[in-house]
Amino acid sequence: MLQVSEKEIEDRLRLDNPWWQSGSGIDPDHQALPRRAYLDDFSRLLGQDVNRAVVLLGPRRVGKTILVYHTIQNLLDMHGVIGRDILYVSLETPLYTGLTLEGLVTRFQKMFHRPDGTRLYVFFDEIQYLKGWEVHLKSLVDTFRGIRFVATGSAAAALKAKSAESGAGRFTEFVLPLLTFAEYLRFIGRETELIREEGEERGTLRFAANDLHGLNDAFIDYLNFGGYPEAVFSETVRHNQRRYIKSDIIDKVLLRDLPILYGITDIQELNSLFNTLAYNTGQELSLEDLSQTSHVAKNTLVKYLEYLEAAFLIRRVRRVDQDAAHFKRATTFKVYLTNPTMRAALFGPVDENHEAIGQLVETAVFSQWLHNAAFVESLYYARWKSGEVDLVSLDAQQRPRFAVEVKWSDRPFEDAKEIKGLIEFSKKNPLGRIPLVTTYSAAGQKTVSGLEVEFCPSSLHCFTVAKNTLERKK
């Protein structure tokens, strides 16, 4: 039986690492793509003097491999790293089947002569293709203390579970989310055309729209296809989202990643549940209702919801009452898709008058906060007998910081009855910030029922939340 030769392996490594050639860098097509806003943050992790591997997590097709390539180019351009000190290996390459991580690293060390103490960088892409990867990576971190290791993979749920289980003290997780609205505008080159900065207030940047009609049009596009970088740049993908996002992203998670990781046998059951959740994104749900609609037993539902969250497909939000108090027995909750694009891919695109537009706008507003992993844990919704508020943030002492009512209409600006829940909640709970109502186009502050309320177009609010979150990360 023929065996893969050492020369074939070395030739493939040279092909995948063009920067080993003097004066070369990453592929020009990759070089030309816009940088994610998280590049600097991610690159800084590699420069820390800590003996840890970085595990890059995120949904499928969010751009993890491209982020790795751009990080490599940064090392070459900004940090003076020599190309031959960087190794990139995609473990889904058939030629590497059966090879160990340590074997690949030792090959890399022997290929080039270097001074003692040279810092090396090793990137393992699609690491979930190696069984027991977490044990092998932990061993490499302990053995090769002069090498900075990075691992990425598409099976986000599997990576997160294994990382937490075996990598304690050895792995640093970095989550790359889907595109925010601010990143989307930058990617399509319209940020400065549509948005202007108007100073800073209490540590938060404030913005205004240069062209609100154009901004709203771009926002509708974002709801339909703006979550995934590839969809932004490919007209083919935008016109066939069902094939790209459903088949290549959602189905691979539901039909392959989760069943393999958690031993799920009834894939149709899981798929039915996700379709129900996607259709009802932003709505209040209960286990009882979900069980009846998706035909899944309640005890199984609880596990499935956890799995779908681990795979970065959904996020659950808990409920508080009009006093911002938690319920002892939580029977209802809200579920949001991590990006509204998924609903459009499953059930068709929307326009500004679509019956589901309110749900998707609320999903978009919530999804901007997902890029602040620590802060998103503070978000709840409030509902009581006579009213509700879409988003409430509580501080460490469980006191309300702010409250937001999400609308895709200008009626609340003229009719106080449209936001009576927000008014009632804000009067009962002193807030750190003026209560906010998002609208279609109405903007400004006005007194409503004796309370100062801020109104902001939903599209502009999404941009503002995303931009401030990214600035804080910097």
Image (cartoon, helix red, strand yellow):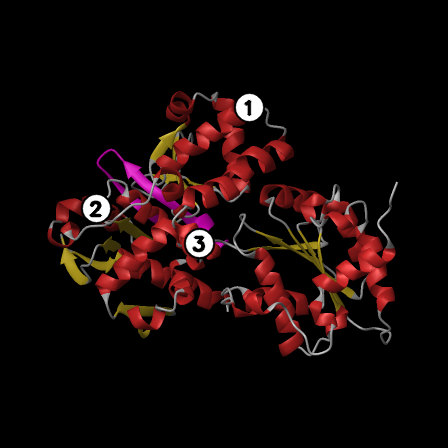
Figure quadrant of the N terminus: top right
Which range of residues does the magenta coloring cover? 372-392
Task: Kindly identify the residue that appears in the image at 55 percent across and 39 percent down.
Answer: 252
Q: Is residue 434 visible?
A: no
In the figure, is residue 315 to the left or right of 199?
A: right
User: What residue is pinned by disc 1?
Assistant: 266
How much space separates mark 3 and mark 1, taking CA atoms? Answer: 31 Å
- At label 2, the amino acid type is Asn
Is label 1 in a helix, a strand or a loop?
loop
How much space separates mark 2 and mark 1, taking CA atoms? Answer: 37 Å
- At label 3, the amino acid type is Ala
Q: What's the mark number on residue 353?
A: 2
Report if the CB atoms under discs 3 and 1 are less than 8 Å apart: no
User: What residue is pinned by disc 3?
Assistant: 231
Name the one closer to the observer, 217 or 118: 217
Q: Earlier in the sequence, mark 3 or mark 1?
A: 3
Q: Quadrant of residue 266?
A: top right
Task: Kindly identify the residue that appears in the image at 52 percent across and 31 percent down.
Answer: 304
Report if the CB atoms under discs 3 and 2 are less than 8 Å apart: no
How much space separates mark 3 and mark 2, taking CA atoms? Answer: 23 Å
Report if the CB atoms under discs 2 and 1 are less than 8 Å apart: no
Q: Earlier in the sequence, mark 2 or mark 1?
A: 1
Name the one closer to the observer, 439 or 101: 101
Is label 3 in a helix, a strand or a loop?
helix
- Which mark is nearer the camera, 3 or 2? 3
Q: Quadrant of residue 435?
A: bottom left
Q: Earlier in the sequence, mark 3 or mark 2?
A: 3
Residue 353: x and y, percent? 21, 46
For the residue carrying disc 2, how many other residues have a C-alpha within 10 Å: few (<14), some (14-19), or many (20+)?
A: few
